[in-house]
Image: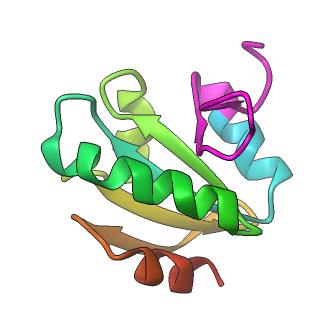
Amino acid sequence: MADSPARTGDDTGTAARHVESERAFEDLLATEGTVLVDFYADWCGPCQMMASTVDELAAEADAAVAKVDVDELSPVAAEHDVRSIPAFVVFEDGEPTDRLVGVQEKADLRAAIE
């Protein structure tokens, strides 16, 4: 599983995918057209508040939705200039196209990936 782009957060496949390595992150961006990445940390209160919203969006959206723990994958966070969390970065064909920082409404996240 270490070489797969990401794993789902639960067995139903409806939760956002948790990216476990730099290679998995690169593979995800290379294989998916539109990706919303939630940069978060377990200790971050606002990130915890956003978790269910992100999972709901993952279940509803056509775009891939992934989560990157900034403590586990700090090089990925640094590469994408994540300085404050939660941070949401939209990628189109591997390139960042939009960024939202802080607690967001689900409608705003959905609009960013549509």
Residue segment shown in magenta:
1-24
Where residue 101 appears, x then y in whole percent? 26, 66
Residue 83 can be seen in this image: no
Residue 31 can be seen in this image: yes
Query: How many numbered dots are placed on residues in this image?
Result: 0
Where residue 109 appears, x then y in whole percent? 46, 75
The answer to whether 17 is drawn above or below residue 53 in the figure is: above
Q: In the rendered structure, does residue 8 fall within the stretch colored magenta? A: yes
User: In which image quadrant can residue 25 be found?
Assistant: top right
Where residue 15 appears, x then y in whole percent? 61, 43
User: In which image quadrant can residue 99 be found?
Assistant: bottom left
Looking at the image, residue 56 sits to the left or right of residue 33; the answer is left
Q: Nearer the viewer, residue 83 or 18?
A: 18
Name the residue furthest right: 31
Looking at the image, residue 78 sits to the left or right of residue 36; the answer is left
Residue positioned 19% across, 53% down in the render: 84
Secondary structure predominantly adopted by residues drawn in magenta: loop
Residue positioned 68% across, 67% down in the render: 60
Residue positioned 72% across, 13% down in the render: 2
Q: In the rendered structure, does residue 12 fall within the stretch colored magenta? A: yes
